[in-house]
Image (tube, rainbow, N blue to C red):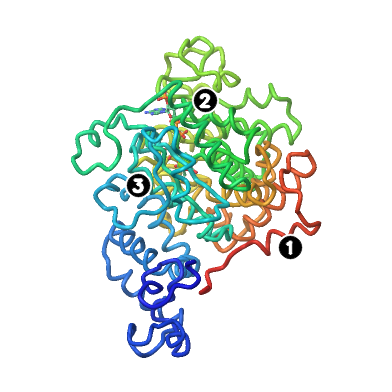
Amino acid sequence: MTETLKGNALLQNGTLSKGTAYTAEERKALGLTGLLPPMPASIGMQEEAMMEVYHSFSTPLQKSIFLDALRAANETLFFRMLMDNVDELLPVVYTPTVGDFCKQYSHLLRFPRGMFLSIEDKGHLAEILNNAPQKEVDMIVVTDGERILGLGDLGINGHGIPVGKLVFYTVCAGVDPAKCLGITLDVGTNRERYLKDPLYLGHRHERVRGKEYDEFIEEFFQAVKAKWPNCAIQFEDFANQNAFRLLDRYRNRYACFSDDIQGTAGAVVAGFFSACRAKGTKVSDERIMFLGAGESGTGSSRLLVEAMKEEGLTEEEARSKIWLFDINGPISTRRSDIADYMKPFAKDVDPSLTFEAYVDLVKPTAIVGLSTCGGAFTESIVRKMAAMNDRPIIFALSNPNSHSECSAEQAYEWTDGWALFCSGSPFEPVTYNRKTFVPRQGNNYFIFPGIGLGAILSGCTGIPPEVLLLASHTVADCVTDADLAQGSLFPPSSFMRKISHDIAVNVIRNAQKTGRCARTDIPADLDQYVTDYMYSPEYR
Ligand SMILES: NC(=O)C1=CN([C@@H]2O[C@H](COP(=O)(O)OP(=O)(O)OC[C@H]3O[C@@H](n4cnc5c(N)ncnc54)[C@H](OP(=O)(O)O)[C@@H]3O)[C@@H](O)[C@H]2O)C=CC1
Ligand SMILES: CC(=O)C(=O)O
Ligand SMILES: [Mg+2]
């Protein structure tokens, strides 16, 4: 129906509108004559003008509010601008700015995008999905808003995250934005501030848990799959008490995966491949201490074990090289409060000592922060790492920047420029001792767009570790010696589409090999199959 839109209705439709770019002939045919200034603009002119406006705003939040409005007016131009200015614009659409946007989402919302499904709607989800803004959906990113970045429970205000993650699907993996759907499941919030905020737009009650929550999630999956049988689903920023359970429950039934558990793991291992290349070592040579034993810390540890096994270690040998810590100290067999998913990494060690005390005892070659705790890698800890290692590996991966375990500047300064560093959110290049370091982000965005793309095109259930490991290799293989020389452990953004394409091909190939492919219409030439699917922002 939308294809026949004309006149003002067409101009106001952000998915279809070309704004000022309609030619004189198109204007005549579409009833647009007189509705626009007379001279048609090219998309290049539109982009130049919008970048001028963008640069006129002084704060990242203002810039992101502007981009949100631009997207509502002309989605093609929005994506074109993003693709042409990835490094400049993505931090404004994604972390760190998306964190500020989310915190105030109910106050800022002007252009609703995606869907909100409330536990109050239980029993009616199938019917409500009929109101989806798009007819065909290939990719869903879903959250219940309980662990948004390192910011904790944001309730429905976390909706900026599924929307922001889906931007990567389009920019990096070429999934048509018209086939992407961000969904927030509103099951309440335990954040006092929002419960008391008169402008908060979610239901004001505590989070629903237990049987009722589980039934709601089950209904969600069944309703989604009945409506869009071929779509893939990415779990995002659920709290760990649900994230592991839900992944285990649904991974063998549907094309779904957890970005925080699995995507992060792929990125962390890619970072290790690069860091070890810079050091001239192997991953299995490392002794690694993780601050944070949740979804991302445990997920990454599991995949590091696989990487070490690939290099010849046994499971037990590999686990012995990885130490996990949570807010209460080391994951120790002497503790009674550790969750099942941590148990494979529990060691028979004193639970009363601090992370720093264990740095002295374990003498790690690498510390990885996935703790949400900004500043947790103190000067004292980082200096000890530098004293014990020629090239200490320091990954401060918590988001946004205010939650980074240390900043790039601190990492280089406290190690006299020897740190092999990356961070979850971007830091500006750092000049130390006349050398400029470019610490690119260690973020799951290198992995999830390709995994999701492969899941869409194969309909595969589950993403096995060997596929994640291949994804890590794909990312690390794009890092050049020149990248390493300037301290970059990840490739530049210009590689993102190639990386996502190659990861997707591996996802499909593995699904075919292991009989997990739901789709029966896959052609033999997988490269071409994936390439043909990938969208580029051109006016429709
Ligand atoms: N760079 C990237 O690509 C990614 C980064 N992240 C970031 O990692 C962080 C954690 O995410 P995720 O693993 O999913 O979250 P979880 O809630 O699953 O895990 C957080 C872990 O950190 C521990 N922790 C919390 N506070 C402290 C503290 N003060 N000292 C030591 N440990 C602490 C928690 O312990 P306890 O459970 O006992 O409270 C828990 O083990 C977030 O900031 C997120 O933004 C996540 C995914 C990807
Ligand atoms: C990057 C990401 O997924 C997170 O911080 O949760
Ligand atoms: Mg996340």
Q: Nearer the viewer, residue 106 or 237?
A: 106
Decide if ligand 1 comes within 8 Å of the CB at mark 2.
Answer: yes
Residue in the picture at 46% in, 48% down: 182
| Image coordinates for residue 42, horizontal then vertical, percent | 45, 83
Q: Please name the residue that numbered disc 3 is placed on.
A: 99
Q: CA distance from mark 2 to mark 1?
A: 42 Å
Q: Are marks 3 and 2 in contact (CB under 8 Å)?
A: no
Label 2 or label 1, whichever lies nearer to me, is 1
Give whichever of discs 3 and 2 has the lower sequence position: 3
Above-or-below relation of 423 to 186:
below
The residue lying toward the viewer, choosing from 30 and 344, is: 30
Q: Badge 3: few (under 14), some or many (20 or more) residues near its Cα, within 10 Å? A: many
Could you say whether the residue bearing mark 3 is in a helix, strand or loop?
A: helix
Please give the label number shown on residue 95: none
Position of residue 177 in the picture relative to residue 465 (left or right): left
Question: Real-space Cα distance between discs 3 and 2?
Answer: 26 Å
Q: As drawn, is 296 to the left or to the right of 309?
A: left
Q: Earlier in the sequence, mark 2 or mark 1?
A: 2
Q: Which residue is mark 2?
A: 324
Residue where numbered disc 1 is placed: 528
